[in-house]
Image (cartoon, rainbow, N blue to C red):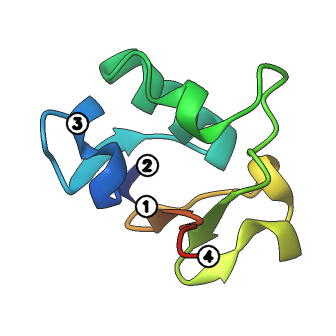
Amino acid sequence: MAVTILIPAPLRRFTEDRAAVQVEAKTVAEALAKLHELYPGIRERICEPDGRVRRFVSIFVNGKDIRSLQGVETPLADGDEVGIIPAMAGGR
């Protein structure tokens, strides 16, 4: 099942400046693992060592937060879009 992972600007330095990457995956966890295979180093920016999504990163499947679905075990279907949104901080 081909899914598209949307890469936010702060992480594109890991994906050769690609805004989107297609992978074959049945779950969000598998999609993240495939992304790491293609672009080593990006997974550490998204996930904790135990595989949980870092608390300052949100992942969406077709616009729905995976935290309200099945987390990284959320199933994916052909054509799904997986969006990665890191929290932004700054100011005073």
Q: Secondary structure at mark 4?
A: loop
Counting residues from the start of the chain, the first of labels 3 and 4 encountered is 3
Determine whether, in the image, residue 50 is placed left or right of residue 2: right
Q: Residue furthest front?
A: 92
| Mark 3 → mark 4, Cα distance in angstroms | 27 Å
| Mark 2 → mark 4, Cα distance in angstroms | 44 Å
Q: Are marks 3 and 4 in contact (CB under 8 Å)?
A: no
Determine whether, in the image, residue 6 is placed left or right of residue 17: right
**Looking at the image, residue 61 lies above or below residue 84:** below
Q: Nearer the viewer, mark 1 or mark 3?
A: 3
Residue linked to disc 2:
1
Residue linked to disc 4:
92
Residue at position x 34%, y 51% in the image: 10
Amino acid on which the number 1 mark rests in the picture:
Asp
Estimate how packed mark 3 is, as few (under 14), some (14 to 19) or many (20 or more) residues with alpha carbons within 10 Å. few
* Residue 26 found in image quarter: top right
Residue linked to disc 1:
78
Percent x, y for residue 2? Answer: 36, 50
Residue linked to disc 3:
13
Q: Quadrant of the C terminus?
A: bottom right
Q: Are marks 2 and 3 in contact (CB under 8 Å)?
A: no
Amino acid on which the number 2 mark rests in the picture:
Met
* Residue 74 found in image quarter: bottom right
Q: Secondary structure at mark 2?
A: loop
Counting residues from the start of the chain, the first of labels 2 and 3 encountered is 2
